[in-house]
Structures are given as structure tokens and as C-alpha cells.
Image (cartoon, coloured by chain):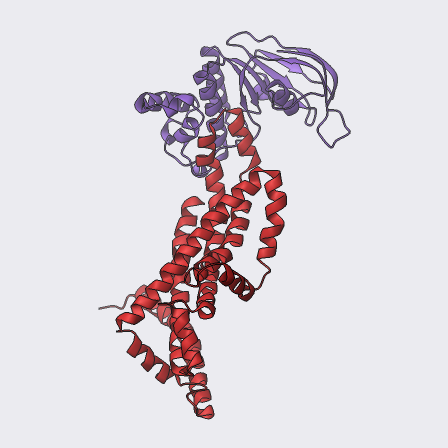
Amino acid sequence: MEIKNLTFAYPLSDQKIFDGLTLSVPIEPGEIVALKAPSGAGKTTLLRLLAGLETPASGTIECPPCAFLFQEDRLIPRLSARNQLRAVLPSAATDAAVAVAADIDSYLTLVDLQGDTDTLVEELSGGMKRRLALARAIAFAKETGRDLLLLDEPFTGVDAARITSILASLRRLNFRVFLTAHEESILALADRVIALESKG
Amino acid sequence: MKNNPNQAKNGGDFLHRFLQFLAPVLFWIVIWEIASLLIGREVLLPSPLRTLSRLGELLPTAAFWQKTLSSLVRIGLGTLGGILVGVLLAMLTKSFKPADLLLSPAIRVMRTIPVTSFILLVLLWVRKDITPGVIAGMMALPLIWESTLAGLAAPDPLLLEMAKTYEMSRARQWRLIRIPALMPHFLSGLSGAIGLSWKAGIAAEVLCVPAMAIGKEVYQSKLYLETVDLFAWTAVVVILSLLIEAITKKLIVKAVAKWK
């Protein structure tokens, strides 16, 4: 991922989030890179710019197709865990229902939700919802042939043992992972940490 | 054998609720009876017993059921038409700015025009047997338009951004996000629209006097000073109105619970 002379401010705001930012983040398959920055420095904004969800005022961004995990869970109300993933998988529209179901269950197993495949999202705890949102991003990436995951605070409410297990699975699946975090415990598990010191 | 305290409590609650419903009804019937005795002229105010007796004479007749069903179908079809048009116009308003600019003020003005003005105008343009249905539809339309519009604006923008980011098809977005967000608003508007349409439809029947209609019976009983008939048919309108509202509310509560 390459960013050159990036300038960005949100509409209706005079304050520039980035002013001439240049950043290069090469990530190898199976590598996990963390973005560290104080609160309000623009971690989420940077990820959204990389994912193409925001348009810079000036500068260039080069980023391959990715799967994006929002800072909020953004799960669809009244759907089960399995159906949250089915909703975003292109192959779920075909008649290979059994094969699709097996694949979906494997993504849920990756985040340790194999016992809650039919549980409605409203019945899940905060940490479980976060893991489900992460499973959705992983499933979408796998099914659409993308190997880059941009994850904004992916482990909010998730316990340390599960975080270690999930990261190990992402390495094993050869994903290139770029995530934001402010907990030192999560940053310590990354292969590399990039610091975003201040705005711009 | 010991008494079950829970059974006793449930029985007591039911009796309490029944008395709460019955007591005001009985109170006003007694007031009605006293007023009719004081006035002493049936042509001005018949007694409740006389009204009930007349209703009892009407109920077993085929003509009564034909007229009642005819009104229900006439007004029901008109209401359905108003609902469909209201939904279509709401979707048009949401999707096209010019449609919003043209339709929004017009529909808002429609809600302020007195029903009788509408009835007399429509009667100039369409047949008298169709007018009550048209009026029922015109009463439903603004309520459905407004509630559908609110529902179309209801989906969580964060969910919509998620759907776009994950390349969800438009059909899936509608099925999983937009329609579930729309339904509680739409159903709330539907509840109000059905009650209003029924009452406005009957009012239109009184003014238009179509054949085989409850409204025609109300009009003719007033014309011939058959006040007992007037009260009896008015009671029919009220009872049907309460039944329609109760059934609609029950169905809507069930449907809303499904979509919540």
C-alpha cells in the first residue's frame, strides 16, 4: 500500500486530518502489520481512505482490493450468525447450499463461534459480535479472492487467547493483515508496528 | 382441595378488566336512556332498548348483510387502491427530486382539505357507486405516503455503507436491510389509514347515496325521520369501525413484532 502527499479533511470541517502524508506499507502474505496512533490521530480515517470509502482532497493512494472491517460491528438485525456471512457471500445465491453452509461454518470456527451458527445476532455478547463481524470480513475476502484485510480495532471485547488463535489462523491462511489497535497487548502480537505520530 | 392462588388472581384480573370496559359503556347507556325518557319523543332520541330491538329486526335479513358486505367491499377496494398508490408515490418521491418537489406539497395539501369538499368534488367526476371507494382511497393515500416515506428513510446508514462495501446485491439490501426498516413505519401508517378510510367512505355513501350501501340507509332514515333506523345503522357503523380497528391492530401488532 502506498500513500503519497495525502491531504484530507472531512466535509464541513476546516481541520485537516492529513496534510501531505506519505506512507509506504509493504505487507507480505501471512504478515500482520499494526497501525499505532493516539486516539483521534486518524487511524480509522486512514483505513477508510485505503479502502476507498473516503476520497482525498489531494494526493494518491495505491491499495489492492481488500476486505474491510469497520470499527462498529454493523451486523444485520434479526439474522443468525451463519446468515450474516451468507448475506455477503456471492456464492450463497447459488443452489450449492450444503457446500456453502460447510464453508461458512469453517469461518465461524476460525473465530470460535462454531457453537452459535444459528444464534441470532441480538443474543450474542459484545465480544461475540466483534468476532462475527471479523468472520464476515474474512469470509468475504476468501470468497472474492482478496488476500488483504484492513481491520479497524478488530479485537474490541475479545479475550487474549482468542486473539492469539485468530491471528495464527490469519497467518496460516496467508492473509496480509493491516490492523489498527491502541492496546499494547495486541500491538505486541503483530509482526510490525507502524506509528502514526500526529495529524499529517 | 386447596384453592390455587394464581387462578384466583387471574380470575380477579379478568373481572377487573371486564368491569373497567363495561362500566363506562353501561354508564353512557343509562345516560342515553334517561335523556330519551326526558325528551319523550322517539323521533328526536329513541331509547337504547328500542335501538337494540330495531337492530335485532335488521340482523336476520338478507338485505342487511348484502348492504353491509357491499359497503365493506366498496370501501375496502378503495382503501387498497389508496395504499398501493401511496406506496408507489412514496417510492417515486424518495427516488426523484423533481417528484419530491411536485408531490410533497400536493399530498400535504390533500390532508388539509375537508372530507366533504373532496366528496362533492369527486361526485362531479365519477359515478356515485364508485365515489365512496375513491374517497376511502384518497383518505388512505397521504397517511400511507408519509409513513412509507419515513420507512424508506429509516435504514441505518452504517448498515447501508456496510452493504455497499461488501458488494451486497440490491435485492439482498432490500430484503435484509431496507424492508425490515420500512415495515414498522408502514404498518403504523396502515393502522391509521384503515380506520380513517372506513369512516370517510361511509360519510361519502351518505352524501352519494349509492345502491346497496350502509350510507344510503343512514341517509334515507334521516330523510324519512326514521330516527330509530338512523340510530340502528349508526350503531352498525360504529361496531364495524371498532371491529375493523381491533382486527387491524391485532394483525399489525403481530406483523410489527415479526419485523422488530
Q: Is residue B132 left or right of residue B149?
A: left
Residue B38 in sight from this viewpoint = yes
At 42% from the left edge and 35% from the top edge, which residue is drawn?
A79
The percent coordinates of residue A151 (x first, y second) are 56, 21
Residue lying at the far left in this picture: please name it: B1
Residue at horizontal 46%, vertical 92%?
B38
A176 over B40 or under it: above or below: above
| Residue B237 in view in this figure | no
- The chain displayed red equals B
- Supply the letter of whichever chain is purple: A
Q: Quadrant of residue B18 in the image?
A: bottom left
Quadrant holding the C terminus of chain B: top left
The location of residue A182, given as percent across then percent down, is 62, 23
Query: Which percent across, then down, holds residue B182?
Result: 49, 43
- Residue A43, located in which quarter of the rendered image? top right
What residue sits 34% from the left and 24% below the top? A101
Q: On the image, which quarter does residue B54 sit in? A: bottom left
Which of A6/B49 is in front?
A: B49
- Where's residue B217, x and y in %? 39, 73
Q: Is residue B171 above or below residue B9?
A: above
